[in-house]
Amino acid sequence: MAPRSIIIDTDPGQDDAIAILLALASEEFQVLGLTAVAGNVPLALTEANARKICELAGRPETKVFAGCARPLVRSLVTAEEVHGKTGLDGPELPAPTMPLQEGHAVDWIVDTLRAAPAGSITLCTLGPLTNIATAMVKAPDIVPRIAEIVMMGGAYFEVGNVTPTAEFNIYVDPHAAHVVFTSGVKMTMHPLDVTHKALMTRAWIDSLRALGSATGQAAAAMLDFYERFDMEKYGEAGGPLHDPCVIAYLLQPELFRGRDCNVAIETRSDLTMGMTVVDWWGVTDRPANCHVINQIDAEGFYELIRSRLARLP
Ligand code: RIB
Ligand code: CA
């Protein structure tokens, strides 16, 4: 079967890093490139972190582009309290030596979608949707050329992780999310409702360290640092690993369950700004625009990640 062509839009972030490593370790994908966006930390760090992760994976030929440095309307909100000041706190990763690609990520997304056969590229979004929305506004013709957007973001039954109603990726740029969710593109959303049902365990993180590879050591160090925030906040024995759900879903969709729903984004109320209003029970006449995931086989998910990261140097 031909590999699936994907573009990963990302704001690394330790959980983004595991998602990127999973993708690069999997022959089911042709990773056309990574597009960095401001989110967990500012753009200068997310693009450098993306390159560090590619070099950790032994894939310095991967194309990495820098995208938007701030949300469409609101000021940038970052999450150093979760990810550390570098965005990848935990391991000491060397400064990247692979080049950052020339040109803006948004232009590369547009050009790549226009040049490829329609419906042949899947966008995997792991951060705020600023790059994707900007590309759609700049070049509306790309929307029908996108096979699907599989994204991590949003929350409904699980409520928010930044405010009582909003999840971080949507909260940072709700206007971008509105553009994407109203574009008509095929979408699958992995909200906190599913990511909070698959918490890491100490044994699993230690199994990464036991791989004995540079990837295993660095991944374990990242997650040792990253999990502490959610463990303290939620009082759980482990933290959620949000972004790899996107990649795992494309690799083994049978690990997940969801429902087609309408999802609308709050962009006006200060109280509920960035809320993903999911019509889970179909009580409105708003048409379904998204496949919303809410169930996961956590054991299968974590074994998939471990077994694939075992392939990396
Ligand atoms: O709310 C979790 C999301 O916000 C993840 O993508 C994490 O990396 C942060 O970007
Ligand atoms: Ca992210």
Image: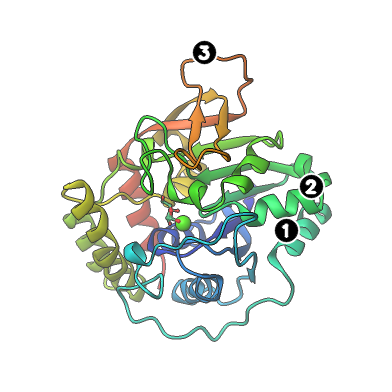
For image coordinates 48% across by 73% down, the residue present is 49
**Residue at x 74%, y 63% (from the top left corner):** 108
Spot occupied by residue 257 in the image (x, y as percentages of width and height): 43, 29
Q: What is the crowding at mark 1: few (fewer than 14 residues within 10 Å), some, or many (at least 20)?
A: many
Residue drawn at the location 63% of the way across and 49% of the way down: 123
Report the residue marked by disc 3.
283
- Mark found first going from the N terminus, 2 or 1: 1
Report the amino acid beneath label 1.
Ile
CA–CA distance in space, label 2 to label 1 = 9 Å
Q: Which mark is residue 109?
A: 1
Q: Is residue 28 visible?
A: no
Q: How many marks?
A: 3
CB-based contact (under 8 Å), mark 2 and mark 1: yes
**Mark 3 or mark 2, which has the lower sequence index?**
2
Residue denoted by label 2? 142
- Which residue is located at x 72 percent, y 58 percent? 109
**View extreme (front): residue:** 270
In front here: 288 or 311?
288
Q: Is mark 1 within 8 Å of ligand 2?
A: no
Indicate the secondary structure of the residue bearing disc 3: loop
Q: Name the mark on residue 288.
A: none
Residue 132 in picture, x, y percent from top left: 66, 52
Whole-number angstrom distance, CA of label 3 to CA of label 2: 32 Å
In the displayed structure, does residue 302 sit left or right of residue 277? Answer: left
Q: Look at the numbered disc 1 and give the secondary structure of its residue.
A: helix
Label 2 CA crowd tier, 10 Å (few <14, some 14–19, many 20+) = many
In the image, residue 125 above or below residue 14: above
User: What's the residue type where badge 2 is placed?
Assistant: Ile
Percent x, y for residue 125? 56, 51
